Every structure is written in structure tokens, then in C-alpha cells.
Image (tube, rainbow, N blue to C red):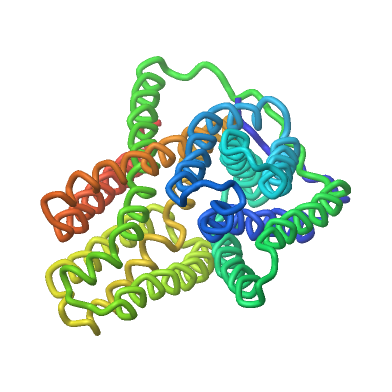
Amino acid sequence: MQATVTEEPQINRKRLTLSLYLNYLIHGFGLIILAQNMVALGGAWSVPVKTVSFVISGVGIGRLISYLITGTSADLFSRKLLVNIGMFSYLIFAVGMIMTHSVPVAYCLAILAGVANSALDAGTYTTLVEMNNGNGYDTILIKGFASIGEFILPLIVATLSANNWWFGWSFIIMAALIILNFLNMLTVKFPQVKHVKTKTGTDFKKTTRYSLKRAVQTAVLLIYGYTSMALMIWFTQWITLFAQKSLGAGNLAAHTLMSLYSIGSMIGVVALFIMLKREVSELKLLVSLNVIAVLALLVLVFAGQNMVLANLASLVFGFSAAGGIMQTGLTVFMNIYPQHRGMVTGAFYFFGSIASFTVPLITGSLSTISIRTAFAANLVVGLFGVALMITLMVLQKTKGED
């Protein structure tokens, strides 16, 4: 079976695409809203900040337990249903967090936020790829809109704090945006995905060879789901402390490296979108950007005492590692299984969720040796990512055997 998309004339592509992107601006709020309000939430729940941090971990658990379910559901039912489930789950999360004073309830709401994330991914990535006949350039902008949300929310929280206003307004703003976009989405039509039978009668040896190759590609891309997420988490968790302890940077200079990483990420989103729009090879981009990310890490680890070089390296790393290569890898994966794009999205991000749990554990252990060791070990992840993408490119070039 192979999936093809039949778009009805009444589908407003621009309106649908913008609505899906707005969900990710809201998702940008959801990613950091608990962390940005940790002290206020701790006061509201009469618990220490450490307990609030524990509640935040529920988001990761929600992703981990739901990605495979939501991905499969997107294929079995509809993309729009999953998007609506994601929006409704985020709405319950936003409203519930300011209504509850119970830590167990708050933890359940955090898990629901993780479910919302996975449902949106399963419905959105598949829709955008299918609307563009397998091209994933529109999925790159998802990260850009999430970054905008992550940029706006701290400004809202800071404004509320500076004026001694109730912290809950940040959650209410998030809820209001969800409701407005949900009302808009009610009348938006999604492309209808139809399945058609492929031709049968393929030579047995040829089919077996193809199946083996596809199995290896699947393993490579699932592992890449882990390494591409780990590469970013590893960097963002340790760059500030690494700069202070190993590079001798002051507090402002150390935080500037993180800011430059974020700026590089946003520049990378735009650049990758343009390159994919112009049909630059996805595999060539995946290999080259992973190589550039490793080179940027090498500069930081071995030549970072020069803060000009460190700043440039952080900018380049954000551009290459966090500008959308994970989403590009997912697009390649979905095009290997066009009839199971939802399931593939769920599996890919399931492995990414494993990274969000294991990286802090691994790096925490390495930090007992030294902060430099904890940060520099990311080079191993980067090199492994390069090896995976080179392997994938070699496999893709053997299409004549399919």
C-alpha cells in the first residue's frame, strides 16, 4: 500500500498551514511555561522548587508513553483528530495548572502536556509532508514557530513579575490562544489521505534485498531520532556551566553563548527552509550539517578560551544542530514509509524522548569527572550522528537494487 493525497479544491492550504504553525507557537509556551513559573508555582502549591522540577519531568513521561500511540492513531483515524486532541490537551493543562493546588494533579497535567506534544506532532508533521507530496520543507518552520513562542513567553512572565501581577495570566494567555486557534481549526479542512495498492509480482530476491535495506534504514533513522535530540539537549544543558568552569567566562559571557545558539537555530530554520524549498538534497544537508555541528563542538572544546571563537562556534552549532536537521531526518523517514507516516513520526520522536531522559543521567555521571568531560562527550554523539547519516546516504544510493 502506498499513500497518496487527494486535495479537495475547498482546502485552504495557507490557512491550514498557518493554523498548524500557530499551534507550535503555543507549544513553545508549553515547553517552558512551568520552568518559567517555578518559583510562583512552588508558592501556590506550598512546595519547594525541587518539587516543581519533579512535576516538570512529567512532560517527558507524557511524551514517552504516548508517541507510539498517537503516531499509530494518526494513521488509523485522521490527522485532524490528533491535532484537535493535542490542542484540547494543552487547554486542559493550561487551565488546570492555575486551578489546582495539588502536586499529584499537577503532575498528571504535566503528563497531559507531553501527550499534547506527541498528538500535535503526529497530526502536524504528517499533514505538512503530505500536502507537499513528500517534501518536508514546511516542517522546518515548525521549529521556528516554537522558538518564537519560547522567546515571547519569558517576556510575558518578566512583565507580570515586574508589575507584581498574578503569574497565572501567562497560562490564561496560552489558553486564550488555544481557544482562538481551535475555533479557527473547526472550519479548516485537512487533505484526505487515500491508500492505493501497489503492483505485485516483484522478484523474491529483489524484494528480500529491498526489505533488508529498508530494515537497516529504519534502524539508522530510529537511532538518529535519539542522537539528533541528544546532541541539542547535551549542548543546552552544559554550555553555560562549561563556559564558566572550563573557559573562564563570566556569567554574562557564558549566558551569551546560549543566546547565540538560539539565534543560530533561528537562522538555521530559515536557511534550511530555503534550501529544501529549492530541492537541495535532504541527505546531503543531513550529512553536511552534522559534520559542521561536530566541527563547531571541536572549536568550543579545544579552542574555546578565545571567546570570539567560542561565540562564533555556538552560533554555528545552533545553526547546524538545531536548525531543523531532526525534522529533516523525520521527513526522510516518512518517505520510506509513506503509508505509515503517523506511526513513523511517533517512533522517531519516541527515541528522541528517550534522549531527553537519558542524557541528563549520562552527563550527570560524567560531570563527576569534570564539567569539561561532561560537555566534550557530546562529540561522541555528534560523530555517531555523522556516521549514521553517511550510512543512510550510502543505502539511499543503492536504489537501483530496489
Q: Is residue 395 left or right of residue 79?
A: left
Name the residue at 35% across, 17% down. Answer: 205
Residue 54 position by quadrant: top left
Q: Which of 253 and 300 is in front in this view?
A: 253
In the displayed structure, would residue 101 be above or below residue 271? above
Image coordinates of residue 195 in percent, x first then y, are 68, 28
User: Residue 176 location, x and y as percent?
Assistant: 79, 57
Q: Residue at x 27, y 73 (%)?
A: 313
Q: Quadrant of the N terminus?
A: top right
Observer able to see residue 137: no
Quarter of the image with the C terminus is top left
275 or 295: which is nearer to us? Answer: 295
Residue in view at x 49 percent, y 35 percent:
61
What x and y, as percent, mark residue 256? 36, 77
Q: Can residue 299 be seen by looking at this rendering? A: yes
Q: Which residue lies most toward the bottom here?
A: 308
- In the rendered view, does 261 fall on the left or right side of 334? left
271 to 106, vertically: above or below:
below
